[in-house]
Image (tube, rainbow, N blue to C red):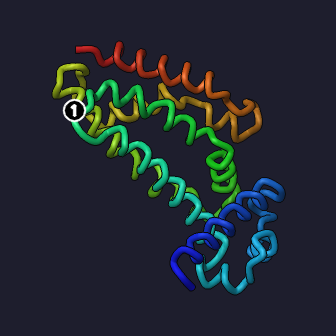
């Protein structure tokens, strides 16, 4: 199978997995139901992903890579680090409260093995946090921010940006956020972060 064809089939299967997850939840999402939705063979899914956890872990990894690629575009070069924070904040928040991210969080909560939660941690925060850390370190070096521990600063930034939005979205207590609401939240979060860590 050609690489382009294989990549397209992966996308089709992963789109089907999200659809089945939304319709049936994690417990009801079987490899067979996903294969049928994607019009693929069950054998193909098992060969490519191993099992259901492998498939959903692949979704997490693709999501994280897409976010990382998007954020890197704002963090390359000699861009002012505070301008970078203002640029990445709405994009990051958009992804973290998106229907796909919420579906994966719900799936991780339903996965008693903890494997999917571990995948979200290793492919999600662990992949994105170093990019934010590097930006915050540049802001500190430029005299725009003052802090001692970079890890604590990253946690503060994410706490201000995301807060309990993911949990409230996952338990159905908060509707999807509009682009205007996301932009407002992101702008306010960066402003508060800058005040709290002002030199």
Q: Position of residue 9 (x, y in %)?
A: 64, 73
Nearer to us in this view, 47 or 9:
9
Left or right: where does residue 1 sit relative to residue 34?
Answer: left
151 w.r.t. 67: above or below: above
In which quarter of the view is residue 83 placed?
top left
Q: Secondary structure at mark 1?
A: helix
- Identified at 41% across, 30% down, the residue is 87
The residue that label 1 is drawn on is: 138
Tell me the quadrant of the picture where the C terminus can be found. Answer: top left
**Image spot of residue 69 (x, y percent):** 42, 50
Picture residue at 65% right of the left edge, 82% below the top: 46
Question: Which corner quadrant of the image does residue 97 belong to?
Answer: top right
Q: Tell me the quadrant of the picture where the N terminus can be found.
A: bottom right
Total number of numbered labels? 1
Residue shown at 27% from the left, 35% from the top:
150
Identify which residue, 184 or 153, lies in the foreground: 184
Asked if residue 55 is positioned above or below residue 191 in the image, the reply reads below
Q: Position of residue 42 (x, y in %)?
A: 74, 82
* 103 to the left or right of 62: right
* Residue 169 in the figure: left or right of residue 145: right
In this rendering, the answer to whether 134 lies above or below 144 is below
Q: Is residue 153 above or below residue 95?
A: above
66 or 151: nearer the eye? 66
Q: Badge 1, how many Cα within 10 Å: few under 14, some, many 20+? A: some
Q: Nearer the viewer, residue 61 or 28?
A: 61
């Amino acid at each position: 199978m050609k690489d382009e064809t294989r990549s397209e089939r992966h996308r089709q299967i992963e789109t089907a997995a999200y659809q089945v997850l939304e319709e049936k939840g994690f417990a009801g999402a079987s490899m067979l139901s996903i294969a049928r939705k994607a019009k693929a063979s069950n054998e193909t899914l098992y060969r490519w992903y191993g099992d259901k956890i492998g498939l959903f872990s692949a979704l997490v990894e693709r999501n994280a890579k897409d976010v990382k690629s998007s954020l890197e575009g704002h963090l390359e070069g000699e861009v002012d680090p505070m301008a970078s924070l203002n640029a990445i904040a709405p994009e990051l928040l958009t992804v973290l409260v998106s229907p796909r991210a919420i579906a994966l969080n719900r799936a991780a909560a339903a996965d008693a093995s903890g494997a999917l939660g571990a995948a979200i941690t290793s492919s999600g925060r662990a992949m994105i946090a170093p990019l934010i850390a590097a930006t915050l370190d540049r802001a500190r070096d430029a005299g725009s921010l003052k802090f001692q521990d970079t890890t604590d600063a990253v946690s503060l930034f994410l706490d201000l940006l995301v807060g309990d939005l993911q949990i409230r979205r996952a338990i159905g207590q908060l509707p999807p956020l509009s682009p205007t609401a996301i932009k407002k939240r992101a702008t306010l979060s960066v402003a508060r972060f800058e005040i709290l860590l002002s030199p």
